Image (tube, coloured by chain):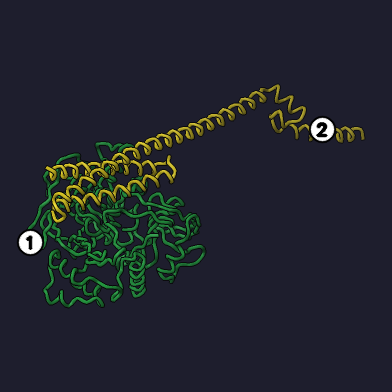
Chain colours: A green, B yellow
Amino acid sequence: MKRGLTVLACAIAIAIAGTAWGHEDGEGSVPLDEIRQVMREHALHPPAESVLEGLSAANFERELRALDPHARYFPAGTWRSPMLSRDAWVGIGAGLVFQQDGVMLLPYQGGGAALAGVVEGMWLLEVDGLSVTGVAPAELLRLLRGTEGSTVTLTLLPPGLNAAPVRLTMVRERFRPLDVELVDASGQRIVRVRDFVGGLTRPALLATLDFVLAASPPSAEGAAPLILDLRDSGGGDLYEALDMAALFLPAGAVLGSMQGPDGRSTVFHAPPGGKVDFPMVLWVGPETASAAEVFAGALQYHGRAKIVGRPTFGKCSSQRDVGLSDGSVLRLTNRMVWLPGGESCADVGIQPDRVVGTAMLRDPSRLLAVSMALRHGRGAKVPPPRAEPDAPAALHQEMF
Amino acid sequence: MKACRRMVITLPMVLWLGGCATSTDPREGGLLGGIQGLGSGAYDARVQEREARLEALRRTQQELEGERSDLETRRAEQTRQVAAERARLQRLDGDVASLDREVAALSAQHGRGDQRVRELQSRLAALKQQMGRQQSALDALEGDGLGDSDADLRRRQLEQQRQALQQEYELLMQLSLELAR
């Protein structure tokens, strides 16, 4: 446990340094008066005047988080529109999942790692012959990153009781992930959504579903469910999530509601239009957050999808980015989001219909077996689990 | 002694002939074996076998050629579709630029403080950002090399996304027209 916490702390430090979004206390000037005014006008719960007056540039980040845990301050030049999907990057096209008992690779469809044969659930043992045991996350990321066209050889342990380590060599290339991925697990195609990007993810999902249908039209009887993987979806644009939920729900169905600082609530309903009527199973986990939770919560409430996985993160609020006169940007919570039944997922998350162990959460073939059984109303008969630690599995993820 | 000499001559001949008779392949049996192979029809069988093998190789080659041809056709079709998509995107880009000028005029007409103009400007800025992203994604798609199913999926996603951008543009156009009235 102690080791796990250390890993978490290191990984978070990297995340802050790596994204260049962090703000070091006391560094540069912070337009405090403007920020106070923005908070008075737009914050979901505007702080008392005495608290606002007490804000200081020296401890700004800490004080801001104390007022609003989801608030962020982006110094000039460091903000990036959440409307945009991920930029291309040079690497092997994979994410690292730091867990208590090791480091797992999560390949992106079409990336160098996936093309070399890396599949989800493989444990990383060595990088170019160097054992990763005890290697700090920052050092591990340094080892994995490299120039375009260079190669790296990874020793990986595939999932399974009797699996032997494999060595795979892959090329670091410029890579842009698909907005919606279509991955294969035990012969079944899984649709994976990692971000809800305004105006982009819904059409990408529609195109992906068309692609799946063109390849293998579902039979009417006993059709395999559409598996939508949200395990690594940290959220994004809330309206995009509602629009996507509307694709699967009849016109008029309540999608959810939002409540702003004025206390007024706006209820959103599914509009008429083209609908997708596949049976569905959603995969969720502790990394599933915000917009992804709202999407999953809406479909679960209406009985439109079964949910398999672990309880989600628990963030049912929306944030607004306000540009400041010096080019910096303040992100603050401005609305609460309610699921169709009127409840919030804040702190409690979405509870899956079938909760699985932390190890199974990263084993697509076993998740698939559970999903099929759940879809057909049977108890799941899945292969015996590997060691299932009680502690949370995914401590942090990094992309490289 | 005579019988002994006869045995000395006969034994090597038996051994020699025995060694030759192990195969009916006319290429492997030596003179006698070859004659035996020709006479027994084994030679024809061997030729037929060779021809069958050659035919199988030809079929495999044809299949590979067909696959290569399919791949090239698919790649050509994807290239054509990407080019068409690029043309559609360029048209939309021109439309958005024109809308941008309209909104600038509206801003001057209604004043910068007008909430509707601000909303329009904000959504237009987002649309322009998405257009830029769409353009670079198309560039990357061409750079990645077309032909495989990943590229096909990516192209389909980009096409659907461009259609969504088109709808957003049409909505903004409508809003700007209403504001202009």
Dot 2 amino acid type: Met
Which quadrant: the C terminus of chain B? top left
In the figure, is residue A374 to the left or right of B90?
left
* Quadrant in which residue A140 is drawn: bottom left
Tell me which residue sits at (22%, 77%) in the image: A56
Residue A382, which numbered label? none
Q: Can residue A209 be seen at all in this image of the molecule? A: no
Dot 2 alpha-carbon crowd within 10 angstroms: few under 14, some 14 to 19, many 20 or more: few
* Whole-percent x, y for residue A70 in the image: 22, 66
Q: Chain of mark 2?
A: B
Tell me which residue sits at (22%, 59%) in the image: A290
When the figure is inspected, residue A169 is found, relative to residue A223, above or below; the finding is below
Tell me which residue sits at (31%, 51%) in the image: A192
Residue A263, which numbered label? 1
Q: Can residue A48 be seen at all in this image of the molecule? A: yes
Kindly identify which residue carries mark 2.
Answer: B13
* Whole-percent x, y for residue A284 in the image: 26, 56
Residue A62 versus residue A80: which sits nearer the camera? A80
Q: Quick check: do tags 2 and 1 share a chain?
A: no
Which quadrant: the N terminus of chain B? top right
* Whole-percent x, y for residue B82 in the image: 37, 39
Outermost front residue: B108
Q: Secondary structure at mark 1?
A: loop
